[in-house]
């Protein structure tokens, strides 16, 4: 018992030694010195960290990406989107394609005429492909830049103006295609016609990134039928580039291409691949949407 008392007394004395005025073996002055040491030490570490971050931020621009040397070419995306890139519907059943037409209607609202009426934000850039529209460098002091108008009426029978079903009701579905945005990216038109599919070579235009769709599988070659393209000659005109980013061009509208499949074989799953063709647009087996996409379409009667 006496051993336990001595032990208990030793611990109590270690916690607080009233004779030497020590707490946990140290005086108040010693604890104060240790406290101040760590305050200064961690304060210096925090200062170094904050200073490093601030120095790095000084090298960055709010408008221009510092490093773009490893940026992949833009993705080619389409509306309507669906799980596993499969579009399947019955043309006699409006409910089977309602989700597709709703997504297209919602997307194209951005291209309504009323949204592009403000002259301080939008300007007409012509109805035929033209060279890049230069609005100054990203880091200039010009402030916000105007954007080119793109009228949805240019998408013809896929605009939704006259046919709110976008062709689905007749078994002739439309798709809206766009190049994804990359700040300050300038897509280049094909360097020569030989790099284009044979069907495009006679239709090639300068200042245009054309799109071409065809069967992905050999067995579907005779089942796709005619494909119509609406917009600027079935491609993306260069006057809509470069894109200046959300801070300088928050109202920017990408040029669109509407694709309509007018004679698909009914009741069969057809796999279709679409590609954008440009001198600096490449494709990757690892990314199915880099400069291209493929989709499975099934139209049931």
Image (cartoon, rainbow, N blue to C red):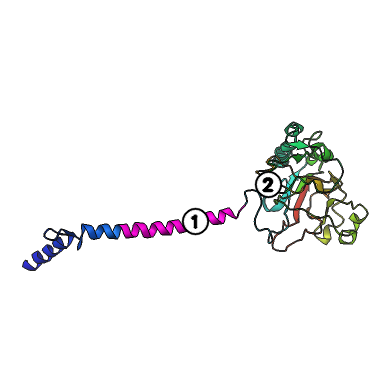
According to the picture, the residue beneath numbered tag 1 turns out to be 51
Where, quadrant-wise, is the N terminus in this rendering? bottom left
Q: Answer above or below: position of 56 versus 161.
A: below
Q: Are marks 1 and 2 in contact (CB under 8 Å)?
A: no
Of 255 and 257, the residue lying toward us: 255
* 38 within the magenta span: yes
Considering the whole magenta stretch, tell me its main secondary structure: helix
Q: Position of residue 283 (x, y in %)?
A: 75, 61
Q: Where is residue 235 in the image (x, y as percent from the top left)?
A: 83, 49
* 163 within the magenta span: no
Is there any visible trace of residue 237 in the rendered image? no
According to the picture, the residue beneath numbered tag 2 turns out to be 245
Q: Where is residue 218 in the image (x, y as percent from the top left)?
A: 83, 61
Of 80 and 17, the residue lying toward us: 17
User: In percent of the image, x 24 and y 60: which residue is there?
Assistant: 30
Q: What element carries label 1?
A: helix
Disc number lying in front (1 or 2): 1
Of 45 and 170, the residue lying toward us: 45
- What is the residue that sits farthest to the left in this orientation? 2
In the image, which residues are magenta? Answer: 36-60
User: In percent of the image, x 35 and y 56: which residue is there?
Assistant: 39
Of 18 and 268, the residue lying toward us: 18
Q: Distance between the residues labelled 1 and 2?
A: 28 Å
Where, quadrant-wise, is the C terminus in this rendering? top right
- 40 relative to 162 in the view: left or right: left
Q: What element carries label 2?
A: loop
């Amino acid at each position: 018992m006496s051993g336990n008392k001595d032990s208990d007394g030793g611990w109590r004395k270690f916690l607080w030694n009233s004779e030497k005025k020590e707490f946990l073996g140290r005086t108040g002055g010693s604890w104060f010195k240790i406290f101040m040491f760590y305050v200064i030490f961690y304060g210096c570490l925090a200062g170094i960290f904050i200073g490093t971050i601030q120095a790095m931020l000084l090298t960055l621009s709010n408008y221009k990406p510092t490093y773009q040397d490893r940026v992949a070419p833009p993705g080619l995306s389409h509306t309507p989107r669906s799980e596993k890139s499969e579009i399947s519907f019955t043309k006699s059943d409006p409910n089977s394609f309602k989700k597709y037409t709703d997504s297209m209607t919602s997307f194209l609202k951005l291209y309504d005429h009323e949204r592009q009426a403000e002259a301080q934000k939008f300007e007409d850039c012509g109805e035929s492909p033209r060279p890049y529209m230069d609005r100054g460098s990203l880091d200039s002091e010009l402030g916000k830049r105007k954007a080119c108008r793109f009228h949805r009426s240019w998408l013809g029978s896929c605009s939704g103006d006259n046919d709110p079903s976008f062709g689905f009701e007749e078994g002739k579905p439309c798709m809206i295609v766009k190049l994804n945005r990359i700040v300050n990216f300038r897509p280049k038109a094909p360097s020569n016609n030989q790099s284009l599919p044979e069907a495009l070579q006679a239709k090639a235009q300068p200042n245009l990134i054309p799109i071409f769709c065809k069967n992905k599988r050999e067995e579907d070659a005779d089942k796709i039928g005619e494909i119509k393209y609406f917009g600027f000659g079935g491609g993306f005109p260069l006057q809509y580039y470069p894109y200046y980013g959300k801070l300088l061009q928050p109202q920017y509208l990408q040029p669109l291409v509407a694709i309509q499949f007018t004679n698909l074989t009914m009741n069969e799953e057809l796999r279709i691949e679409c590609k954008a063709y440009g001198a600096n647009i490449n494709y990757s087996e690892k990314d199915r949407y880099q400069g291209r996409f493929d989709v499975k379409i099934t139209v049931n009667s």
